[in-house]
Amino acid sequence: MCGRFYINNDVISLIKRLKSDNEFSCEISPGDIFPSQKAWIITKHDNNFGAKEIKWGFKNSNNGLIINVRSETVFQKKMFSKAVEKRRCVIPSSGFYEWSAIKEKFKFYRKDHDTLYMAGIYDTNDDGERFAVLTTEANSSVSDIHGRMPLILEKNQVRKWLNETDEYKEILEQTPVELNRKSDFEQLKLF
């Protein structure tokens, strides 16, 4: 699951490279991104990759937000099936946070480079464009904290995820890379 993620200056540089200077109208600051806030996503239109800022969370019928979508069932849900077929996106981040059962906050990030690419989908509704993060079963680096985690793309999979072919389907079934984790205060166990 992903209930909050963060960006640092490396991710901001990536976003600025994908956005042309004349279109770039706002400052991006490093920090945490919360559900319902705007965040930058990477999309592909007419064979060009670009970054755009949209809100995190699909609105549901109860005026709540759906911020994560299970990759295993994304085609079974009418609300998401068209988006995964036609409107896939990548959410660049420096990492994400997860909380343990006893409310310890953990930061998860890549071991090998600064940008963590999360697979996502986006759609347009009555109040604009919105995105959700695709999740999968947690791997061993996350599973003792939470049973779900974002579906993480390797850098060389970004193009495959965004292309208009069916190549993206195999990514939905992959196990994400092992991550580093850090907590300011982790409860030690005696046994």
Image (cartoon, helix red, strand yellow):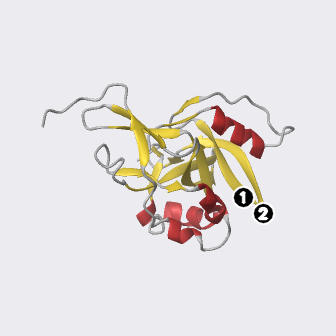
Image height of 12 relative to 171, above or below: above
What is the x, y in percent for residue 37? 57, 35
Question: How would you rate the neighbour count of disc 1 (Cα within 10 Å): few for under 14, some for 14-19, many for 20 or more?
Answer: some
What is the x, y in percent for residue 187? 24, 29
Foreground residue among 67 and 162: 162
Q: Left or right of 60: which side holds 40? A: right
Q: Left or right of 19: which side holds 114? A: left
Name the amino acid type tagged 1.
Answer: Lys
For label 2, the residue is 47
What is the x, y in percent for residue 20? 83, 42
Q: Left or right of 76: which side holds 20? A: right
State the separation of the CA atoms marked 1 and 2.
6 Å
Element type at mark 1: strand
Extreme-bottom residue of the structure: 166
Element type at mark 2: loop
Image height of 86 relative to 141, above or below: below
Name the amino acid type tagged 2.
Answer: Asn
Extreme-top residue of the structure: 185
Residue drawn 87% across and 38% down?
A: 22
Extreme-front residue of the structure: 112
Mark 1 in CB contact with mark 2 (< 8 angstroms): yes
Question: How would you rate the neighbour count of disc 2 (Cα within 10 Å): few for under 14, some for 14-19, many for 20 or more?
Answer: few
Query: Could you say which quadrant of the image residue 44 lies in?
Result: bottom right
* The disc label shown at residue 69, or none: none
For label 1, the residue is 44
Which image quadrant: the C terminus?
top left
Image height of 158 relative to 28, above or below: below
Foreground residue among 69 and 10: 10
Count of numbered marks? 2
Residue drawn 53% across and 50% down?
A: 132
